């Protein structure tokens, strides 16, 4: 048997045949050439321009797609509770499930851009005055501080079973911050 008969399509694993317009160089059958996974492998578009990025480029590879609306919603909901690397891993796993294992993964820069200004969360273990001031400034910019009054604090204290000392400290900090702004 010659080597041509043993070659199989990288995507569907069928045998390749040059007489059926199969691409023996990229190891793709004629049926798989139109699939999204094939475009990432360097199949030329109808205009004749290859979709594979140049290997001589020193810049970071571009991801296979931008974040979908569902992924943007996920990022906005969990970026404050999850380390960025873990979130990026989840997003890249989702991308691989959607587009196949050959899809170019998302970069950390893309994730930071998606997080945007919402990424100004308090660092882990930030229980000092500087972290508290940053948190209050962020709450003020987002409008959350404007809706907090004494009744909201009292309701919060009941729901979360705060003791009187905690309630007094919370009122002092939040209401004083609101008073200083006005």
Image (cartoon, grey):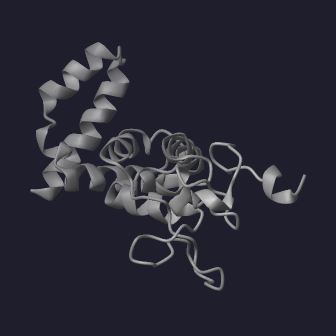
Is residue 164 depicted above or below 18 in this figure?
above
Q: Nearer the viewer, residue 158 or 17?
A: 17
Residue under the image location 28 percent in, 20 percent down: 157
- From this viewpoint, which residue is outermost toward the front? 19
Residue under the image location 58 percent in, 80 percent down: 59
Image quarter in which the C terminus is found: bottom left
- From this viewpoint, which residue is outermost toward the right? 1
Q: Is residue 182 left or right of residue 108?
A: left
Q: How many marks?
A: 0
Is residue 121 depicted above or below 173 in this figure?
below
Q: Nearer the viewer, residue 60 or 26?
A: 26
Q: Nearer the viewer, residue 3 or 115?
A: 3
Is residue 17 depicted above or below 55 in this figure?
above
Residue under the image location 21 percent in, 46 percent down: 176
Q: Position of residue 20 (x, y in %)?
A: 59, 57
Q: Is residue 55 left or right of residue 73?
A: right
Q: Quadrant of residue 60?
A: bottom right
Residue under the image location 19 percent in, 41 percent down: 175
Q: Position of residue 128 (x, y in %)?
A: 49, 49
Q: Position of residue 172 (x, y in %)?
A: 26, 39
Is residue 107 in view? no
Is residue 66 depicted above or below 166 in this figure?
below
Q: Position of residue 48 (x, y in %)?
A: 45, 78
Is residue 80 in view? yes
């Amino acid at each position: 048997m010659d080597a041509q008969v043993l070659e199989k399509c990288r995507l569907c694993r069928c045998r390749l045949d040059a007489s059926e317009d199969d691409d023996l160089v990229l190891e793709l059958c004629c049926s798989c050439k139109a699939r999204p996974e094939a475009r990432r492998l360097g199949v030329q578009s109808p205009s004749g321009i290859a979709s594979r990025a140049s290997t001589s480029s020193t810049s970071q590879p571009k991801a296979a797609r931008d974040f979908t609306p569902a992924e943007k919603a996920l990022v906005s909901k969990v970026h404050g509770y999850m380390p960025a690397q873990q979130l990026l891993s989840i997003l890249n796993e989702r991308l691989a499930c959607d587009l196949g294992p050959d899809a170019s993964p998302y970069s950390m820069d893309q994730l930071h851009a998606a997080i945007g200004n919402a990424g100004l969360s308090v660092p882990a273990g930030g229980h000092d005055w500087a972290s508290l001031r940053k948190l209050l400034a962020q709450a003020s910019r987002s409008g959350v501080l404007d809706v907090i009054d004494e009744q909201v604090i009292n309701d919060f204290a009941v729901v979360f079973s705060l003791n009187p000392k905690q309630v007094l400290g919370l009122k002092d900090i939040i209401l004083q911050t609101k008073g200083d702004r006005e």
